[in-house]
Amino acid sequence: MRIGYGWDSHEFQAGVPLKIGGVEIPFYKGLAGHSDGDVLLHAITDALLGAVAAGDIGSYFPPTDPKWKGADSVIFLEEALKQVRLAGYTVSNVDSTLILAEPKIIPHAKKIQARVAELLGVQPNQVSVTSVLRVSKVLALVSCAALLLT
Ligand code: MG
């Protein structure tokens, strides 16, 4: 059994789509980033990589590399899953908390849960997506833990 922990934050930016957990959420601003800014997928990616001590998202996809400009963060998650499998583990569950002032995540939580589960190749009941409406309107933060089993 291995446990990994992931954390990420992105600033909101007008005029870009908001993607959280691979789901596009209707909102008047999105998250800035070198990639598509999917803060949840980034935190899960780091939790998975951390669980098998296989580095972090930046060691596979440096933000300085123009190749990853605007990249779909699903690519990052897939690399992390590959590393998990190479190390001989499978995902048992992922627990994540989004910390942001807006938009409200609850109306989208089921869809995000289903999409993340699909991406991880697990059942929705192995993925928890919760949120707390706090902090500023400037940042979206995610804290995430992943449990892996052999
Ligand atoms: Mg990030």
Image (spheres, rainbow, N blue to C red):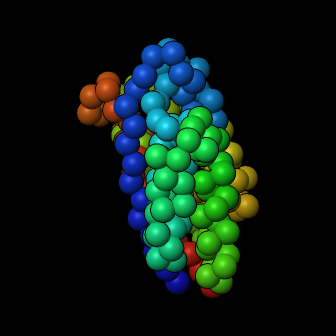
Is residue 20 in view from this perspective? no
Query: In the rendered view, would you say 27 is above or below 127?
Result: above
- The x and y percentages for residue 56 are 46, 63
- Relative height, residue 112 to residue 86 (above, below): above
The C terminus is located in which quarter?
bottom right
x then y, percent, for residue 76: 60, 54
Is residue 120 toward the left or the right of residue 101 in the image?
Answer: right
Q: In this view, does 30 lie to the left or right of 84?
A: left
Residue at horizontal 70 percent and vertical 62 percent from the top:
122
Q: Which x, y percent locates residue 62?
A: 49, 53
Q: Position of residue 92 (x, y in %)?
A: 60, 71
Using residue 144 as the reference point, say whether residue 136 is left or right of it.
left
Q: Which of 82 and 113 is in front in this view?
A: 82
Q: Among all residues in the image, which is located at the extreme left?
A: 135
Q: Which residue is drawn at 56% across and 75% down?
A: 148
Number of numbered labels in the structure image? 0
Residue at image coords 61%, 56%? 77
**Nearer to us in this view, 72 or 101:** 72
Give the residue displayed 70% in from the left and 53% down from the top: 119
User: Does any portion of residue 118 appear in the rendered image?
Assistant: yes
Q: In this view, does 86 lie above or below 121?
A: below
- Closer-to-camera residue (52/122): 52
